[in-house]
Image (spheres, helix red, strand yellow):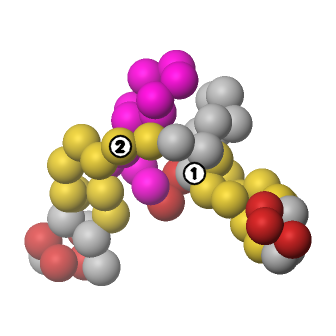
Amino acid sequence: MTDRLVKCCRCRNKHLESERDKKPTNKYGCWGEDSVCPRCACTTYYLVEDVKSKEQSQ
């Protein structure tokens, strides 16, 4: 499995996509979870690069 390095659109924090927190949401009348920035809780981010997992490199 590959993990992706992402950058928050609000605070420009670089972090792995797997490090993003889950926040409950009621968008469009349907309960679910949004992936949010661990620093500022923003829901928008963009891809910086793909990072290979340690399992694949060994």
Mark 1 belongs to which amino acid? Arg
- Mark 1 Cα shell of 10 Å, populated few (<14), some (14-19), many (≥20): some
The mark closer to the camera, 2 or 1, is 2
Specify the segment rendered in magenta.
5-17
Secondary element at tag 2:
strand
Residue 22 sits in which quadrant? bottom right
Q: State the quadrant of the C terminus.
A: bottom left
Residue 36, compared with residue 57, is above or below; it is above
Q: State the quadrant of the N terminus.
A: bottom left
In the rendered view, does 33 fall on the left or right side of 24? left
Residue 6, compared with residue 8, is above or below; it is below
Residue sitting nearer the eye, 17 or 56: 17
Residue 55 is situated, as x and y percent measured from the top left of the image, at: 25, 77
Residue 45 sits in which quadrant? top left
Mark 2 belongs to which amino acid? Tyr
Residue sitting nearer the eye, 35 or 1: 35
Residue sitting nearer the eye, 5 or 9: 9
Residue 29 is situated, as x and y percent measured from the top left of the image, at: 87, 71
Question: What is the spatial separation of the Cα atoms under label 2 and label 1, in whole angstroms?
Answer: 13 Å
Residue 46 numbered tag: 2
Tell whether position 38 is magenta: no
Residue 15 in view of the camera? no
Residue at image coords 57%, 51%: 20
Secondary element at tag 1:
loop
Residue 23 is situated, as x and y percent measured from the top left of the image, at: 78, 55
- Residue at numbered disc 1: 20
Residue at image coords 83%, 76%: 30
